[in-house]
């Protein structure tokens, strides 16, 4: 098995609109990101994954791509993107971009052509009659055009689905991959990767999609050490592993881990299943606690139901902030210690909570409007980051960020947390630094703990990770404590706490 950088990498997700605003217009941009590269380097990231940065009407935060070879002017220019790639590489940070192959934007040249000329519609899904499919964002999955035909959009109406039975679509995306690999991009996160093909009765996980990735793999392999990462929400790990066969995608997000409740038995089950199924195809497991689509861990883990539910089902249910914060710290050290790749979503390292009280009129996620307001959408995890200072915009840039930040985020700024040795930010910094030398890719060996509410395992480096999910403090094994997510007393590990020890 080859040993390449992405197998054990810590990949930091930048949601560009909300990361840092370099020109003061209230929207994060490439200038803001470039100015904060040293922060990401010091944090201990190995790579940065950016959500879509292409020209877009922003009907779905940029996942409605109008031009796959350009940069959204609000974010910057292609020349700036090239500078970002070069500057990141100088700091030994890899750059991963988002490619969206399932759907495009109604503003794209191809779709405009299709609207103007019914003979140019084969690149999309046009039909004389719609079926009864519902959009993932709510409401019908079909929209009618003025001449009476309907087009399919599994997401918002502004996101028409491509027809992958058309060879031009294949050619286009292979060209797009080359376009960005030629510019030095180190990897691609493949959006909605299981969708693409549709039959009369099914719209995901159809066999021909695997051939697409076999071709993409050949493109990636014709460059030096590039990675293809799948965004695959599938019902089971076996289906996921089929996308990770040696000639398909390299790796994928582990959403079973992300969605798993804070429960020792469930976690143990998901970890074991992940390790076993990934081993069958030789792909590294990954560990993900959050991203731009899901409730922030601090809020999730403070609720009675600690799992993640789509559709905002748990939105607004009571969450104990201290409990959630303690568990999020423990979960972070658990995830960092597991073998494979790690994803950190911006703000996770600051322990930001979900912002659940955004005024409805400011919500921008199409899920909110399309569900008739029953689903609050994902804006609550996309609020611009607090960098410094005592009041909004907390150093984000410009006087008014595109979504308002809570006034009480002053203690959560990166500046305030850098000065506090016990902060979440310093836990991530220390954890990621130790992880780089002692953890990452490899295997684990479970240790008998005498209490099935305690998860304990050792890694090849001799580091042992112990996570206590039970209600009582438990004694730690012998060894030097390297890092703990909470205060230890008399070598006792408190509830909802994880510690790393050097045991050999
Ligand atoms: C998954 C992305 O993560 C999400 O933000 C987006 O809305 C859908 N795919 C559609 O592109």
Image (cartoon, rainbow, N blue to C red):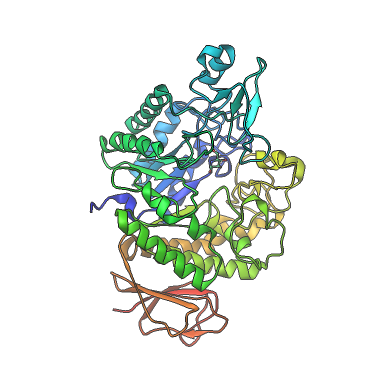
User: Above or below — where is 176 with respect to 459?
Assistant: above
Q: Position of residue 359 (x, y in %)?
A: 76, 46
Q: Position of residue 183 (x, y in %)?
A: 35, 31
Residue 421 visible in the displayed image: no
Residue 248 visible in the displayed image: yes
Q: Quadrant of the N terminus?
A: bottom left
User: Above or below — where is 143 with respect to 251?
Assistant: above
Q: How many marks?
A: 0
Asked whether 99 or 396 is in front, the reply is 99
Asked whether 63 or 450 is in front, the reply is 450
187 relative position to 129: left or right: left
Q: Position of residue 5 (x, y in %)?
A: 30, 50
The single residue placed furthest to the bottom in the displayed view is 490
Q: Answer with the quarter of the image where residue 23 lies.
A: top right
Quadrant observed for ligand 1 in the rendered image:
top right
Q: Residue at x 66, y 34 (%)?
A: 140
């Amino acid at each position: 098995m080859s040993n390449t950088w992405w197998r054990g990498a810590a990949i930091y997700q930048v949601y560009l609109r909300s990361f840092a605003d370099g020109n003061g217009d209230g929207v994060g941009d490439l200038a803001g990101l470039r100015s904060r590269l040293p922060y990401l380097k010091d944090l201990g990231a190995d790579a940065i994954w950016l959500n879509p940065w292409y020209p877009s009407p922003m009907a779905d935060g940029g996942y409605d791509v109008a031009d796959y070879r350009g940069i959204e002017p609000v974010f910057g220019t292609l020349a700036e993107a090239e500078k970002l790639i070069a500057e990141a590489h100088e700091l030994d940070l890899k750059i991963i971009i988002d490619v969206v192959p399932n759907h495009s934007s109604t503003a794209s040249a191809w779709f405009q052509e299709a609207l103007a000329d019914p003979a140019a519609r084969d690149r999309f899904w046009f039909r004389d009659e719609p079926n009864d499919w519902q959009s993932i964002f709510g409401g019908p999955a079909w929209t009618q055009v003025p001449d009476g035909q309907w087009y399919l959009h599994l997401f918002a109406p502004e996101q028409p689905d491509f027809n992958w039975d058309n060879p031009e679509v294949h050619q286009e995306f292979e060209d797009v991959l080359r376009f960005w690999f030629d510019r030095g991009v180190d990897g691609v996160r493949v959006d909605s990767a299981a969708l693409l093909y549709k039959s009369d009765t099914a719209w995901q996980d159809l066999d021909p999609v695997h051939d697409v990735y076999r071709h993409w793999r050949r493109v990636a392999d014709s460059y030096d050490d590039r990675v293809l990462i799948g965004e695959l929400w599938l019902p089971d790990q076996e289906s996921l592993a089929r996308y990770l066969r040696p000639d398909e995608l390299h790796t994928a997000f582990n959403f079973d881990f992300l969605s798993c409740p804070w429960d020792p038995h469930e976690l143990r089950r998901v970890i074991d299943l992940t390790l076993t199924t990934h081993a069958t195809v030789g792909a590294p497991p990954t560990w993900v606690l959050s991203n731009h689509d899901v409730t922030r861990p601090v809020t999730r883990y403070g609720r009675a139901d600690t799992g993640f539910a789509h559709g905002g089902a748990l939105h607004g249910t009571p969450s104990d902030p201290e409990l959630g914060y303690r568990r999020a710290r423990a979960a972070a050290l658990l995830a960092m210690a597991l073998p494979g790749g790690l994803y950190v979503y911006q703000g996770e390292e600051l322990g930001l909570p979900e912002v659940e009280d955004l005024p409805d009129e400011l919500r921008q996620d199409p899920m909110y409007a399309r569900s008739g307001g029953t689903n609050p959408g994902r804006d609550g995890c996309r609020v611009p980051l607090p960098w410094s200072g005592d009041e909004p915009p907390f150093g984000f840039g410009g006087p008014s960020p595109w979504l308002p930040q809570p006034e009480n985020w002053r203690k959560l700024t990166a500046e305030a947390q850098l000065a506090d040795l016990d902060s979440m930010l310093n836990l991530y910094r220390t954890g990621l630094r130790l992880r780089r030398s002692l953890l990452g890719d490899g295997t684990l060996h479970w240790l008998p703990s005498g209490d099935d509410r305690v998860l304990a395992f050792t890694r090849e480096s001799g580091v042992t990770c112990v996570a206590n999910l039970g209600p009582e403090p438990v004694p730690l094994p012998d060894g030097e404590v390297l890092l703990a997510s909470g205060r230890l007393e008399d070598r006792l590990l408190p509830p909802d706490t994880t510690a790393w020890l050097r045991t050999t």
